[in-house]
């Protein structure tokens, strides 16, 4: 989990998108993966806006566990519905910018895949497999 | 030669009873800057989407009549080919940011990547487009860290960079301050003079009066007025239907009642008003 957060926070979305496409992921799927990672901080901002809006309409958010858990629905529901409504506009916007074009795509940034990176990837893969084996072996021995 | 040609266009969104556009006949010449005005729900956005190909390709629904842009018939084209000729930017800037890019520069290049523009052509095109709209200094910022007005400029630039023949703008300056609005109208005016055709849905009548070549007024899905800004914006047809009216027109109309305004024509710009009152 910590590894995933570190990855999402430190990887440039465009670089990730290009890398995904390089390994053969279709561009629409790559787009979904990348925008989902980007959406997390925006979700937090939006949730706090909704929280403020609901509070100003008299929603109780402080108190014991029961009071607080009752406040979840009036916050989650607008958050989810609002996000769904945004999808249509975003689809129009990226379509207007040729997202579904059947021309060969080009890329502004280039990611050089150096020999060192290639070797490191292999080393990490071997390390991962080794650690899984070690863990399983340890589990079996105890 | 009309680059946009709509004939007898009637359109109904799916699951609705009433047509959003009713028997629209609308021709626009190359290099013309046409402002579309009308109260909310009059069909401005639907007209924009129709010219941009999203009606009916994206929204589905029932469309009758013919829509032609640059000689191509909308019903016989694909949306992904259509967008190469017609660029669309709309009101909410936040949803126009792709969400897959780290900087404004890359955001603007997104469309060019999709349509396969080579990298060494892409960089000067993005630079030129940013210079044109005055956002060069935002190049390295994150698109999400910008103000609404700045985001609207990024959205506009992202479309301009694709060099469309026709530019369709649906309230592109709604979140801008007066300085930003003036600059954007100025840029659009320049582009129209260079031969780009512009359709802009907009409420700000005083800006329209100063910059547009022509005004089309929509009401309940129909075109009720179409002409030069001075004539269209002061037309009696618009009265009482919720249209924005230039403050100069309102002042002169009142002045006419008391005999202070002596001309036949009512003003829509500050200059016209000053000139008219100069003889008093």
Image (cartoon, coloured by chain):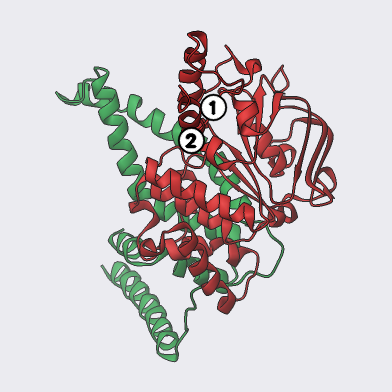
Chain colours: A green, B red
Task: State whether residue B204 appears in this view.
Answer: no
Residue B271, disc: 2
In-image side of A9 versus B72 (left or right): left
On the image, the x and y values in percent for residue B156 come to: 52, 51
Q: Residue at x 26, y 26 (%)?
A: A69
Work out how far the residue at label 2 is from the one at label 1, CA to CA, in angstroms: 8 Å
Residues behind callouts 2 and 1 on a single chain: yes
Q: Residue at x 33, y 49 (%)?
A: A41
Residue B267, disc: 1
Task: State whether residue B150 appears in this view.
Answer: yes
Residue B72 higher or lower than A49, as above or below: below
Whether pointer 2 and pointer 1 mark residues with C-beta atoms closer than 8 Å, the reply is yes
In-image side of B67 versus B87 (left or right): right
| Chain that bears disc 1 | B
Residue A5 higher or lower than A24, as above or below: above
Circle 2: element type:
helix
């Amino acid at each position: 989990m910590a590894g995933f957060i570190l990855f999402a926070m430190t990887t440039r979305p465009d670089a990730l998108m290009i890398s995904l496409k390089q390994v053969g992921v279709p561009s629409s799927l790559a787009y979904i993966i990348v925008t989902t990672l980007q959406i997390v901080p925006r979700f937090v901002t939006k949730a706090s806006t909704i929280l403020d809006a609901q509070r100003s309409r008299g929603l109780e958010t402080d108190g014991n566990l029961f009071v607080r858990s009752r406040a979840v629905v009036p916050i989650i529901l607008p958050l989810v519905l609002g996000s769904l409504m945004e999808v249509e506009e975003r689809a129009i916007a990226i379509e207007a910018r040729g997202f579904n074009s059947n021309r060969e795509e080009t890329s502004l940034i280039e990611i050089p895949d150096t020999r060192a990176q290639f070797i490191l990837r292999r080393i990490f893969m071997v390390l991962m497999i080794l650690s899984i084996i070690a863990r399983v072996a340890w589990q079996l021995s105890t | 030669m009309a680059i946009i040609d709509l004939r007898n266009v009637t359109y109904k969104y799916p699951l609705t009873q009433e047509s959003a556009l009713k028997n629209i006949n609308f021709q626009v010449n190359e290099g013309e800057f046409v402002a579309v005005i009308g109260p909310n729900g009059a069909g401005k956005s639907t007209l924009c989407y129709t010219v941009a190909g999203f009606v009916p390709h994206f929204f589905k629904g029932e469309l009758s009549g013919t829509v032609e842009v640059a000689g191509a018939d909308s019903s016989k084209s694909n949306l992904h080919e259509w967008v190469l000729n017609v660029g669309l930017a709309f009101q909410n800037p936040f949803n126009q940011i792709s969400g897959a890019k780290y900087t404004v520069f890359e955001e603007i290049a997104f469309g060019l990547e999709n349509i396969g523009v080579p990298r060494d052509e892409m960089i000067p095109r993005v630079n030129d487009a940013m210079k044109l709209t005055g956002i060069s200094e935002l190049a390295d910022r994150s698109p999400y860290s910008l103000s609404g007005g700045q985001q609207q400029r990024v959205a506009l630039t992202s479309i301009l960079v694709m060099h469309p023949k026709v530019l369709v703008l649906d309230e592109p300056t709604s979140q801008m301050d007066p300085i930003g609005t003036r600059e954007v109208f100025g840029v659009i005016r320049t582009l129209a003079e260079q031969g780009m055709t512009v359709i802009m849905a907009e409420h700000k009548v005083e800006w329209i009066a100063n910059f547009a070549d022509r005004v089309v007024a929509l009401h309940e899905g129909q075109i009720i007025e179409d002409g030069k800004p001075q004539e269209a914006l002061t037309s009696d047809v618009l009265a009482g239907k919720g249209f924005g009216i230039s403050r100069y027109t309102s002042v002169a109309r009142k002045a006419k009642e008391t005999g202070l305004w002596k001309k036949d024509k009512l003003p829509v710009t500050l200059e016209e008003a000053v000139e008219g009152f100069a003889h008093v």
